[in-house]
Image (cartoon, rainbow, N blue to C red):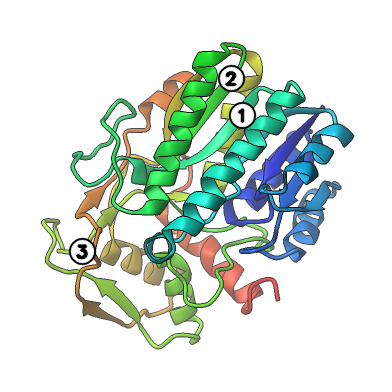
Amino acid sequence: MSILVTGGTGYIGSHTCVELLDAGYDVIVVDNLSNSKIKAIDHIEGITGKILKFYKLDILNREGMYNVFEENDIEAVIHFAGLKAVGESVEEPLRYYQNNITGTLVLCEAMQRYGVKNMVFSSSATVYGMDNESPLTEDLPLSATNPYGWTKIMIEQILRDTYASDGTWSIALLRYFNPIGAHESGRIGEDPNGIPNNLMPYITQVAAGKRKMLNIFGNDYDTPDGTGIRDYIHVVDLAKGHLKALQKVIESNGIDAYNLGTGIGYSVLDVVKAFEKATGKEIPYVMADRRAGDIASCYADPSKAYRELGWKAEKDIYDMCKDAWRWQVNNPNGYE
């Protein structure tokens, strides 16, 4: 029996494939490579010494997805595939709704047709919106400030309705906080197209001399140093959370949401200082205006994942910084 990973060549997907292969699972990846590189497959196989099966395929391609299920004995699906840039989603909402929601519907129809009812879904802490106070728990009301966040909320609801209609489904909704870092081998990591949207790859590109300085958006928040606080989690810890969730959905029926975070909030300046201490590289920065939609503080209560999945984050902020820098040094142009 195999595990199908949609979006498996992406940042989180590639790290999860490594953990799956190391744990002895057979892995099938479906990815259209719109925001990732095929070379990630070589690096995954190089790290693990194992082969996975790859389909270059868009999940919107219904016949192509049916073919994947027809050709393989699939036990469960880990669903990462989707567009994920918040700002871009505001500019191109129809594209985001079409891709993320319709793609998930096509995937679920294929799963239903072939009797595969175990899913781990890549959701996001953006579903908590701006009005909930941290630490965030899974039972809080959901809202979003952008189309990307709304696609996650809508997909969660689609999956809840699917389970309500057929109790033999088993689904874990994993709400990520802020993944950073890279595999300790330095062979896979975050490889953004163009200017990074996320803090850590921007920091590593500044450290490498690819960018002049870091823009810090907002220094007047109600936080100890005025910069925004987030829950940063090592991507390998996050990947391991998917294995724990996978075990649960294979062994039992139901649907539930889990926060995957550390429960510790670090400000932007905390991360800059931790990176400088971990790597010895100075990060010049300049303060800029706040970005629309950003909130002062956002961090998880991850106790439910520990209680019900037996998972907790183990790596600290220095591990995250060291591993992110190792990836940057070893791969100055990403997978190119």
Q: In front here: 120 or 272? A: 120
Indicate the quadrant containing the N terminus: top left, top right, bottom left or bottom right. Answer: top right
Q: Position of residue 133 (x, y in %)?
A: 18, 39
Left of 192 or right of it: where is 138? left
Disc 1 secondary structure class: strand
Left of 30 or right of it: where is 81? left
The local crowd at label 1, few if under 14, some if 14 to 19, many if 20 or more residues have their Cα within 10 Å, is many
Left of 191 or right of it: where is 89? left
Amino acid type at circle 2 is Ser
Can residue 183 be seen at all in this image of the molecule?
Answer: yes
Q: Are marks 2 and 1 in contact (CB under 8 Å)?
A: yes
In this figure, which residue is indicated by the disc labeled 1?
119
Amino acid type at circle 1 is Met
Q: Position of residue 182 (x, y in %)?
A: 57, 58
Indicate the quadrant containing the C terminus: top left, top right, bottom left or bottom right. Answer: bottom right
Disc 3 secondary structure class: loop
How far, Cα to Cα, is label 2 from label 3?
Answer: 40 Å
In this figure, which residue is indicated by the disc labeled 3?
227
How far, Cα to Cα, is label 2 from label 1?
Answer: 6 Å
